[in-house]
Amino acid sequence: MIDFHYWPTPNGHKVTLFLEEAGLDYTIHPVNIGKGDQFKPEYLAFSPNNKMPAIIDRAPADGGEPQSVFESGAILLYLAEKSGQFLSTDPRARIETLEWLFWQMAGLGPMTGQYGHFNVYAPEKIPYAIDRYTNEANRLLQVLDTHLKGRDFIAGDAYSIADMATYPWIGVYDKAPIDMTPYPEVQRWHAAIKARPATERAYARAKDVNPDAGKTMSDEEKKLLFGQGRR
């Protein structure tokens, strides 16, 4: 049994994508990041960076005490290794998958997040920041588009944790959509993953957990989410 501490954000969706594809037994524990659940001492005990998601595996492979894991990339890697799914055992295919997993963690996710912050959430429009992160988000999309030519998935012919990590960060911001016309390979790849039954199930969990997903955040929620809350 996996205890999954979740809120419907791109990083949270990564893990529901894996859990639904792998058919693992899990229970969702909502972490309402707009109300500050991520700062509660009981949550910080296993997710010290006060971010979401995190898991606690009640039946780890070594048979020992429950294993907690925080950071979405680490969770995907942990679950892939435990289940033997979505990460090839072939050394070359494995390293390619990990390259693109870390590319998403270090590049696409943070840069697209900053794009969204300065275009959607920032209390004032800062042209330099908007231009900086818009350009970087588009650069990374071009990198992915070029890589996907002739490939069904990011790491070749097999769906992997690299795809699960990347998919939720494409087309995130309805209020500031990025023009995807220049990236036909990304569009093709994204549409194929969206059509997977497990993807539909994973995203259905979002409304179960937060029926208000997509609504405008309050000023207090913004303070908590953007580092102006508890210290």
Image (tube, rainbow, N blue to C red):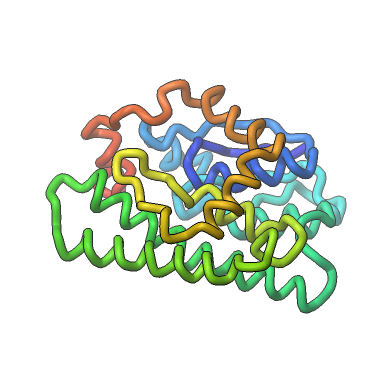
Q: Can residue 83 be seen in this view?
A: yes
Percent of width and height locating residue 182: 42, 60
For the point 25% across and 41% down, the residue is 223
Position above or below: 112 against 38: below
14 or 25, which is in the foreground?
Answer: 14
| Residue 174 location (% of width, % of height) | 36, 39
Between 64 and 176, the one nearer to me in the picture:
176
The answer to whether 37 appears left or right of 16 in the picture is left
Q: Is residue 27 left or right of residue 30?
A: right
Picture coordinates of residue 130, whole percent (x, y): 22, 59
For residue 133, which quarter of the picture?
bottom left
173 on left or right of 209: left
Q: Is residue 70 visible?
A: no
Q: In this view, does 82 lie to the left or right of 5?
A: right
Q: Is residue 29 above or below residue 167?
A: above
Residue that appears at 84% across and 69% down = 89
User: What residue is shown at x 69% (from left), y 46% (from top)?
Assistant: 18
Q: Residue furthest bottom?
A: 92
- Quadrant of the image containing the N terminus: top right
**Total residue callouts:** 0
From the top left corner, tell me how far across and down residue 66 is, in percent.
74, 47
Residue at the image point whose x is 44% and y is 67% from the top: 140
Q: Nearer the viewer, residue 36 or 91?
A: 91
